[in-house]
Every structure is written in C-alpha cells, then in structure tokens.
Image (cartoon, grey):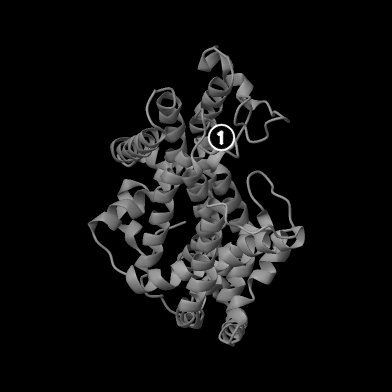
C-alpha cells in the first residue's frame, strides 16, 4: 500500500453531529421496534404475547421495516468515511476487529443464548435449566433458522455486526482507492452526475437489482452493502448532500408521505383490490424506493436540524453501540415475564420498553463503561484513550 493510498482525505471534514444524532435515534427506535415484535401477529419472535397485537403495532413494525436497518448501514458507511480521514487502511482493519468482531463473538456466546433459551420456554413446555439446555444452543434447527422457538443456534440482532464486519473488509480497498487522486476524480464524476436533475430518484433501480439476492444470516448482503457504500460516497463530496437538500421536499413526498398513505389505507382496510402485478409494483416501491427516499429525507432534515451537540449526545454517542448490543437480550428477558401478566397489551408494551431501556442504560453506565475489560468486550476504546473518542463523528 502506498503512503498516498493509506493517508487521509485531502482535508479533515467538518464535524457532523447530525450523524451521531441519527445513529442514536436509530438505536432508540430499536427498543420500540423489537418490543413491538413481541406482539407481532404475523411473524414469530423469541418471546410472543398471546393474543398478539392490535393492528397499531403491526403498522408500526411495517413503518420501520423497509428502511430502518438500511439507515444503520448507510450511517456506518458515512462514519467509515470520517474514520479513514485519520486512519490508515491497516489501522482501520485492526479497529474493525476490535470494534466489531470481538463484540460479535462475545455477544453470540454470552448475550444471545438467553434469547434462544427463553424462546424455547415461551413456545413450548420445556422446563430444563439454562445450563442443562446450553449445549443445544450450538445446534442448528432447520425448522427454526432464526432460533426463535426451538432453542437452537441464533445470532439474534448481532447479525448486523457480523454483516458490517464483512462489508468493512470487502470494501476497504475500494474506499482506500477513493482516497487517492484517481479515485477522487471518480468520486467527483459521481457527484457531478448526482447533481443532474432526476438522478437522485433513479438510484432505487440499483436497489431493485440488489434485492434479488437472497438473505444470508439475517440480511441481504448485496442490498445492505450498497447502502454502506452509498453512505461513504454521500459524505465524500459536498455536492451529494447539497443535491439531497435541494430535493428534500420531493423526497419527503415520494418517501414518508406516500408510505404513510399506503400504511393508513392498508391499516383501515381501504386498500383497493389490485391485480397481482400491481401489488408487486407497490411492494417493490416500498422495499426499494421508499427505503431510499425515507433515508435521504432523514439525512436532509437531520443535517438542517441536528448538527449540534450537548451533554446528552456526548454521553449517549459513546454508549449507542453498547446499547445496541445489550438491548434485545434485555427486551427478551423482561418481555418473557411481562407477557405472563394479566394486564392490557398497551401496559405490557410500555413496561417492556421502559424497563429494557432503563436496564440497558444502567448496565452500560454501571458495568460496561467502567472498566477496560468490559469496554474491550463491547468494542469501546480503553479509558486511557477516552479523550480520543470524541474526535470526528461517532463510529459505526
């Protein structure tokens, strides 16, 4: 690797607090989303309430599913751009191992098994202890590939970390090339093309092709790596975000507004009886165009409204990743007990969200961030390097 290729971008970019805010908001939304999954009438989950939810919870799940994880990958790509502004390629790979691979292994061995075990208890009459069951965690269940209800192996929500680790290794040569003068010229050409009227609205055609790839251990790799690369590129030339900002009203209408209308019509049984091909077109629009338009709308308004910092952001920006790692295990543990209570579904939902969020924050504050060994297991910098954490945007 040449010195030129391993150095940072031409100049240090401006601090983007909005990226930190958006990542933090995306993590907070997971508490509401994964708690709603407990009441999902259409898909199983580790812990399931009986009876399932009213239509409102179903609509909430549908409203986030097309774009929420794609936003995580795009923000990770954006953060990768900033990371490579002060880190070599080799340093970036070493950081990815510490930041992603080690927490993934730790999480799968320690944090995920309780989810699988409680899923088995919730969906069956199984009564053996956790430690008697534990060897079964390493068994793949063909009838339950997600590990929701047969007590078999699962990666749970940590599939995202594994995918992000693999994507980071796969695309680092491309990103380093974009750092070089010849690569910068290609980025400039992409940015120039992006400013052409209408081009910003055509990118979902690429996503349509990527969506043909089957899911692998939790997600579609071609679809999500496309968002990861897009996040890097959008930060690499100001013309990308300037174009998105100019088109924000149209993006708002084509994405969130139209999607909200569709959800309301479906939720109120007002959706017309369309031919199968027309329903397929609508589904394709939601899965690809809505995902892109909603995320760009969020980026545009986030850039305008959220580019500031305060004590709340400083505290949670460092802890957002740990909250992601912790949240679903605590939701499942708390949810397992709450669903057995004879109270209204709305009360159960609020209790699970509040208790799991509080437990996650307390675990992070009292356990994870206090010692270097726990920080290491959760992919955080050691306390001796704490001052360096605030440089640039928060890491993916």
Q: Is residue 181 above or below residue 321?
A: below
Residue 201 on image: x %, y % = 60, 76
The percent coordinates of residue 99 (x first, y second) are 48, 49
Relative height, residue 186 to residue 40 (above, below): below
Query: For this rendering, which residue is in front, 100 or 123?
Result: 123
Task: Judge from the rendering whether residue 264 lies leftward or rightward of residue 204; answer left or right.
Answer: left
Q: Which residue is mark 1?
A: 45
Task: Report the residue at 47% width, 81% height from top.
Answer: 238
Q: Quadrant of residue 222?
A: bottom right
The image position of residue 97, as x and y in percent, is 53, 49
Q: Residue furthest left?
A: 311
Q: Viewer-proximal residue, 7 or 21?
A: 21
Q: Give SS at disc 1.
A: loop
Residue at point 50%, 70% (across, down):
296
Name which residue lies at 57% across and 65% down: 290
Can you give x and y, in whole percent of width and height, for residue 334 in the image?
40, 29
Mark 1 is surrounded, within 10 Å at the Cα level, by few (under 14), some (14 to 19) or many (20 or more) other residues, namely many
Q: In this rendering, does residue 237 appear at all?
A: yes
């Amino acid at each position: 690797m040449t010195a030129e290729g391993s150095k940072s971008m031409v100049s240090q970019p401006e601090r983007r607090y909005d990226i930190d805010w958006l990542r933090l908001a995306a993590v907070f939304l997971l508490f509401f989303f994964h708690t709603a999954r407990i009441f999902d009438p259409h898909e199983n989950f580790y812990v399931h309430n009986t009876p399932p939810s009213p239509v409102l919870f179903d609509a909430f799940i549908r409203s986030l599913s097309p774009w929420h994880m794609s936003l995580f990958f795009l923000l990770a790509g954006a953060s990768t751009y900033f990371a490579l502004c002060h880190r070599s390629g080799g340093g970036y790979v070493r950081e990815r191992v510490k930041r992603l691979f080690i927490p993934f292994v730790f999480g799968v061995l320690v944090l995920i098994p309780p989810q699988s075990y409680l899923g088995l208890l919730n969906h069956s009459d199984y009564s053996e202890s956790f430690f008697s069951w534990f060897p079964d965690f390493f068994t793949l269940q063909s009838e339950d590939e997600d590990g929701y209800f047969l007590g078999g192996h699962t990666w749970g929500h940590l599939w995202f970390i594994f995918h992000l680790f693999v994507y980071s290794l796969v695309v680092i040569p491309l990103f380093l090339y974009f750092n070089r003068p010849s690569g910068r010229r290609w980025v400039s050409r992409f940015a120039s093309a992006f400013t052409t009227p209408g081009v910003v609205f055509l990118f979902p055609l690429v996503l349509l092709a990527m969506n043909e790839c089957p899911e692998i251990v939790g997600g579609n790799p071609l679809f999500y790596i496309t968002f990861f690369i897009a996040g890097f590129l959008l930060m690499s030339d100001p013309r990308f975000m300037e174009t998105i900002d100019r088109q924000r009203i149209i993006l708002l209408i084509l994405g969130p507004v139209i999607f909200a209308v569709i959800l309301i019509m479906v939720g109120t049984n007002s959706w017309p009886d369309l031919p199968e091909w027309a329903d397929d077109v609508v589904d394709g629009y939601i899965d690809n165009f809505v995902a892109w338009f909603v995320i760009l709308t969020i980026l545009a308004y986030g850039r305008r409204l959220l580019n500031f910092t305060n004590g709340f952001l400083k505290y949670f920006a460092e802890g957002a990743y740990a909250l992601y790692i912790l949240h679903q295990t605590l939701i499942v543990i708390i949810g397992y007990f709450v669903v057995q209570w004879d109270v209204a579904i709305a009360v159960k939902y609020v209790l699970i969200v509040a208790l799991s969020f509080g437990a996650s924050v307390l675990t992070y504050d009292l356990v994870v961030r206090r010692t270097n060994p726990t920080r290491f297991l959760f992919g955080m910098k050691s306390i001796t390097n704490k001052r360096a954490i605030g440089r640039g945007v928060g890491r993916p």
